[in-house]
Amino acid sequence: MMVSTNEAVDAICRHIGFDPPRAGAVAKKLTEAGTIPSGGPGKSPELAATHVVDVVLGCSVDAPLRAVASAVEQYRGLVLGGANLSTAPAAIDRTAGDALDVWADIALHGDADLLRRDRIEVVSSWPEIAIYRDGTVTRFVAPGALASHWQASGHRRSTTINGAAFVDALREPFLKEHK
């Protein structure tokens, strides 16, 4: 099932708590860049779960609007632990984008309750996504970066997304669940 951009943005803002004007502007920039689909004459765009993940990433990164699309692409391309996984088996999530898409698929088609205690942290000080689950953390960073080390001098800025909020933001528009 597909949802419109407005439905997705409304659910993201309602459940995750992003600023509605900013989230709408992020979705517009991602549409202009071709990252998420645009509609046709008299037809609103239809988003898949991966596109909603892109909007959430775009709202989470601390990037100016003009750079949101490239930031989403960069963050989607982060790799597990900074390792080169180009020759890894296909069953391994190669990038943060793959992992978040699987996460979204489980939220929609699997046991979403398994994800409600998770946290997704998007670091803006340097490109990093950390997924916290059951007392462990999986870090996605740029290839060659040391995932367990501070990547830059200065303060670490990040946006942490509650797993339950992200699950609800996905399930509401796609499965028409209202909480």
Image (cartoon, helix red, strand yellow):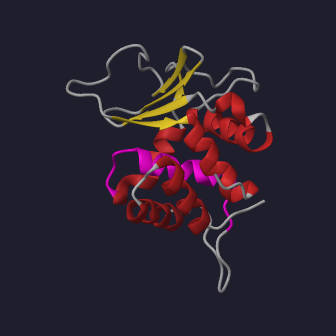
Give the image location of residue 73, x and y in percent: 50, 46
Give the image location of residue 137, x and y in percent: 52, 18
Answer whether residue 56 is magenta in the image: yes
Give the image location of residue 44, x and y in percent: 65, 76
Q: Which one is nearer the viewer's eye here, 75 or 53?
A: 53
Q: Is residue 175 left or right of residue 148?
A: right
Vertical order, 66 against 38 (above or below): above
Quadrant of the rendered image containing residue 115: top right
Total tally of numbered discs in the picture: 0
Q: Work out whether residue 42 can be spotted.
A: yes
Q: Which one is nearer the viewer's eye here, 49 or 160?
A: 160
Q: Which one is nearer the viewer's eye here, 155 or 86?
A: 155
* Residue at 41% in and 13% down: 148
Answer whether residue 12 is magenta in the image: no
Majority secondary structure of magenta residues: helix
Vertical order, 67 against 129 (above or below): below
* Residue at 61% in and 65% down: 7
Q: Is residue 51 left or right of residue 77?
A: right
* Residue at 59% in and 28% down: 117
Q: Which residues are magenta?
A: 46-64
Vertical order, 171 against 98 (above or below): below
Q: Which residue occupies the extreme front position in the image?
A: 179
Give the image location of residue 58, x and y in percent: 46, 50
* Residue at 42% in and 45% down: 60
Quadrant of the rendered image containing residue 152: top left
Quadrant where the N terminus is found in the figure:
bottom right
Q: Work out whether residue 35 can be spotted.
A: no
Q: Which residue occupies the extreme left position in the image?
A: 154
